[in-house]
């Protein structure tokens, strides 16, 4: 695991932003460009209101793991959701031959 202080700082700021979103209100009016980019990405993902909080919590945990693995930038929510979709799809494809064998 490599340590990148800039990405670590971004992760701390990301966690602050996520805490504000999970609380339900963002109380500031100044954002860094990468925060705006992430907020716009979150908005375009059109999350179901019933699942939004849980998805954002899982996204936050995934972001931490992403940085711990040595990432040089933060993961967008759309990228996280796409990775999960591909994992589910791959898992379903692996299970399909087992289901057909019965």
Image: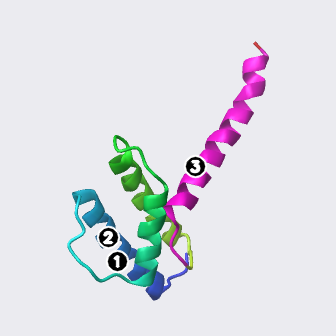
| CB contact under 8 Å: marks 2 and 1 | yes
Tell me what residue is drawn at x 41 percent, y 68 percent.
Answer: 39
Q: Quadrant of the C terminus?
A: top right
Above or below, 84 against 70 in this view is above
Residue on which disc 2 sits: 17
Mark 1: few, some, or many residues within 10 Å (few <14, many ≥20)? some
* Residue 50: quarter of image: top left
Tell me what residue is drawn at x 41 percent, y 50 percent.
Answer: 55
Disc 2 from disc 1: Cα separation? 6 Å
Disc 2 from disc 3: Cα separation? 22 Å
Mark 3: few, some, or many residues within 10 Å (few <14, many ≥20)? few
Q: Is residue 76 left or right of residue 12?
A: right
* Residue 79: quarter of image: bottom right
Tell me what residue is drawn at x 49 percent, y 60 percent.
Answer: 77
Total marks shown come to 3
Residue 38 image offset from top left, x and y in percent: 45, 70
In terms of secondary structure, what is the magenta stretch mainly? helix
Residue 67 image offset from top left, x and y in percent: 50, 72
Residue 89 image offset from top left, x and y in percent: 67, 40
Tell me what residue is drawn at x 23 percent, y 77 percent.
Answer: 28
**Secondary structure of the residue carrying numbered label 2:** helix
Q: Is residue 86 left or right of residue 26?
A: right
Is 86 colored magenta in this rendering?
A: yes
Is 24 colored magenta in this rendering?
A: no
Residues in magenta, as a range: 73-101
**Secondary structure of the residue carrying numbered label 3:** helix
| CB contact under 8 Å: marks 1 and 3 | no
Q: Residue 84, labelled with which disc? A: 3
Residue 37 image offset from top left, x and y in percent: 47, 74
Residue on which disc 1 sits: 13
């Amino acid at each position: 695991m490599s340590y990148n202080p800039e990405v670590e700082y971004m992760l701390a700021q990301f966690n602050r932003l996520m805490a504000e979103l999970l609380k339900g209100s963002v109380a500031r009016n100044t954002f860094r460009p990468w925060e705006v980019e992430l907020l716009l990405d979150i908005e375009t993902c059109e999350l179901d209101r019933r699942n939004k909080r849980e998805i954002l919590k899982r996204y936050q945990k995934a972001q931490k793991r992403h940085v711990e693995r040595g990432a040089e930038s933060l993961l967008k929510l759309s990228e996280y959701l796409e990775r999960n979709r591909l994992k589910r799809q791959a898992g379903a494809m692996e299970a399909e031959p087992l289901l057909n064998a019965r």
